[in-house]
Amino acid sequence: MEKLNGLSFTDSSATLNCNSKTGNKVSIALGLGKFEPTKHKLYFSDTVWKFIHNEKRIDHLIAKNLIDDKLAYGVDGDFPKTEIKYIKIKFNGNWLTIPKSSFANFYEVHTETIEAYLSKDKKFIFLYISASDGIGSYAIKFVFDKTKFVTRLISTNECTDGFDFLDALPQDCQ
């Protein structure tokens, strides 16, 4: 794989513009925005009740961490502060089709950790992102072909360091 260099970032955005060694031109833009709770359906926990001497009491809570009926990554029982607003990729002059559903449940992204690679056969772009609210860390590998989003891989493995989980676990994790 060839690493695509040229990342620039702020707290709310990341851009990467690169010409690969084989002449492919890749532009990537990711934008974050403030999470607005009133625009989402939130479901963070279930309450489990028990009865003691005929009195209903809270036994414990079960974390759900659902936002808009999807598991929310980067939250730990509280509202996230930021969410991904867009991911845009241009490959050799053509914009890729990237549905909002491919990134809608990722929160608290760290723009400074973004990495991108071009596959050896030049057919795929891999976009790596890590994120966390401090406790619920996770990492994502997005896979794109020359025209569209293909899939994503998500890891919440605390043992991994960086993006190694996507291709192999570090020796300490096995």
Image (spheres, rainbow, N blue to C red):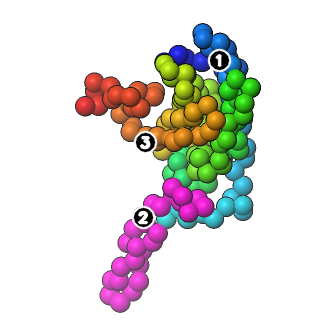
* Earlier sequence position, callout 1 versus callout 3: 1
Question: Secondary structure beneath disc 1?
Answer: loop
Q: Is residue 23 above or below residue 152?
A: above
Residue stretch in magenta: 46-71
Separation of residues labelled 1 and 2 (CA atoms): 48 Å
Q: Amino acid at mark 2?
A: Ile
* 123 or 118, nearer to the observer: 123
* Earlier sequence position, callout 2 versus callout 3: 2
Around disc 3, counting alpha carbons within 10 Å, would you say few (fewer than 14), some (14 to 19), or many (20 or more)?
some
Counting from the top left corner in percent of width and height, residue 111 is at 63, 30
| Residue that carries the numbered disc 1 in the rendered image | 24
| Residue that carries the numbered disc 2 in the rendered image | 62
| Residue that carries the numbered disc 3 in the rendered image | 156
Q: Residue at x 57, y 55 (%)?
A: 78
Q: Residue furthest bottom?
A: 54
Around disc 2, counting alpha carbons within 10 Å, would you say few (fewer than 14), some (14 to 19), or many (20 or more)?
few
The quadrant in which residue 17 appears is top right
Counting from the top left corner in percent of width and height, residue 75 is at 54, 50
Counting from the top left corner in percent of width and height, residue 160 is at 38, 31
Q: Is residue 71 above or below residue 110?
A: below
